[in-house]
Image (spheres, rainbow, N blue to C red):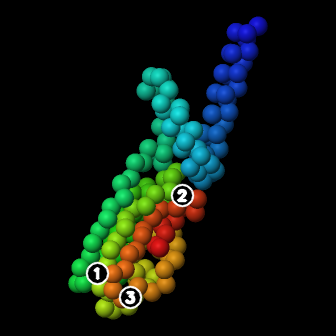
């Protein structure tokens, strides 16, 4: 009887895991970061590679980059390039985890700019709609801008 219980429990757990994978594939942000934690546990099990599920959004191990921009480089075009790179790192909004892409240190911003000026440099309408601008205008001396991907919203946040 104990063997039957163990087998029944394993089948039930396996069924729940398969259901979660299917739900997350139909609704990309169904479980978000929690889903990736479950995936990482399953991925660490001693199973053959062909039995381990492959979920690209959870296989990301992005590195936070610190960037120092001198006076001449502090402009909307440069910032838009970093936003586009972050969007690529997030697999165009399909990543299953939130992460910081860039921490940008601006020495001096002589010409004030904001969200509209940065979005003018971005070609993709999808990316323009996927930016959550939280900092108002950028101006002054010694400013730090953080560009991160938020998996819950599926958007790039500029903080």
Q: Distance between the residues labelled 2 and 1?
A: 30 Å
Q: Mark 1 points at which residue?
A: 107
Side of 28 relative to 3 (left or right)? left
Looking at the image, can residue 74 be seen? no
Vertical relation: 134 (above or below) 35: below
Residue 142, compared with residue 151, is above or below; it is below
| Viewer-proximal residue among 118 and 73 | 73
Q: Nearer the viewer, residue 122 or 106?
A: 106
Q: Mark 3 against mark 2, which lies toward the viewer?
A: 3
Circle 1/circle 3 CB separation < 8 Å:
no
Q: What residue would you read off at disc 3? A: 139
Sequence-earlier tag: 3 or 2: 3
User: Which of the labelled discs sits on residue 151, or is there none?
Assistant: 2
For marks 2 and 1 on the same chain, the one whose residue lies earlier in the sequence: 1
Instruction: Give me the residue at 52% from left, 77% from top.
Output: 134
Q: What element carries label 3?
A: strand
């Amino acid at each position: 009887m104990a063997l039957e219980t163990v087998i029944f429990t394993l089948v039930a757990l396996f069924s729940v895991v398969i259901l979660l994978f299917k739900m997350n594939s139909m609704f990309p942000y169904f479980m978000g970061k929690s889903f990736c934690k479950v995936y990482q546990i399953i991925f660490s099990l001693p199973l053959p590679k062909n039995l381990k599920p492959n979920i690209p959004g959870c296989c990301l191990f992005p590195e936070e980059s610190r960037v120092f921009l001198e006076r001449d480089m502090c402009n909307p075009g440069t910032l838009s390039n970093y936003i586009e790179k972050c969007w690529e790192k997030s697999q165009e909004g399909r990543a299953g985890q939130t992460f910081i892409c860039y921490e940008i240190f601006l020495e001096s911003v002589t010409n004030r700019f904001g969200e509209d000026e940065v979005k003018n440099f971005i070609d993709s309408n999808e990316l323009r709609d996927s930016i959550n601008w939280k900092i108002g205008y950028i101006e002054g001396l010694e400013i730090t801008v953080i560009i991160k991907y938020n998996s819950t919203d599926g958007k790039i946040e500029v903080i």
